[in-house]
Image: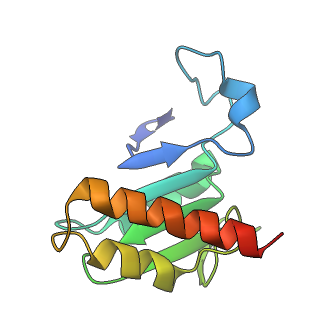
Amino acid sequence: MTISNEAIEADESFYLENEPKVRAKERIDLNVDPPPDLGVEIDMTTDSRRRFSIYAKIGVPEIWRYDGRAATIHQRQQDGRYNVVDRSRYFSFLTAADLTRVLAQRGQVDQNTLVRSFREWVKSQLGQSR
């Protein structure tokens, strides 16, 4: 993603609400297309918070950040700053503590088991909210 002279490349980014607007696109141009709804940063060696101002300029509403110990959820405010919040705006059942718990299991179980377990947990949460 590029905005003026500044560039940012999230570890992962996702379109959720805006997915229909970019669905058939081979290439996304942030000068005309909406920004991703969610950015994910895994900060094992560098601190991504220094790039949050670039995320704000692009207009990314939510960032999940994991520093190797804890996950945090950051939501963009009207003034462009990000505040740490407890729950995701896109997945209201998901808290930063939940993300931390899941990510802490990395290295204890294989990735397939971890993903399968997380999917089952998500399904159980969605079943409770109905």
Residue at 61% x, 16% y is 25
Task: Please state which of residues 71 and 33 is positioned toward the viewer in this rendering.
Answer: 71
Q: How is the image coloured?
A: rainbow
Quarter of the rendering containing residue 7:
top left
Tell me where residue 55 appears, x and y as whole percent: 53, 54
Left/right placement of residue 17 relative to residue 66 reads: right
Residue at screen point 33% across, 72% down: 103
The answer to whether 95 is drawn above or below residue 36 in the figure is below
User: Relative to the observer, which residue lies in front, 10 or 4?
Assistant: 10
Q: Residue at x 74, y 75 (%)?
A: 128
**Whole-percent x and y of residue 76?**
66, 66
Residue 81 in view here: no
Apparent side of residue 9 relative to residue 124 in the rendered image (left or right): left
Residue 93 drawn above or below residue 29: below
Question: How far from the left and from the top, in percent, is residue 112?
Answer: 28, 53
Q: Residue furthest right?
A: 130
Does residue 103 appear anywhere in the picture? yes
Count of labels shown?
0
Relative to 2, say whether 92 is above or below.
Answer: below
27 sits left or right of 87 in the view: left
Q: Quadrant of the C terminus?
A: bottom right
Residue 6, image quadrant: top left
The percent position of residue 84, horizontal first and vertical second, equals 57, 81
Name which residue lies at 40% across and 58% down.
116
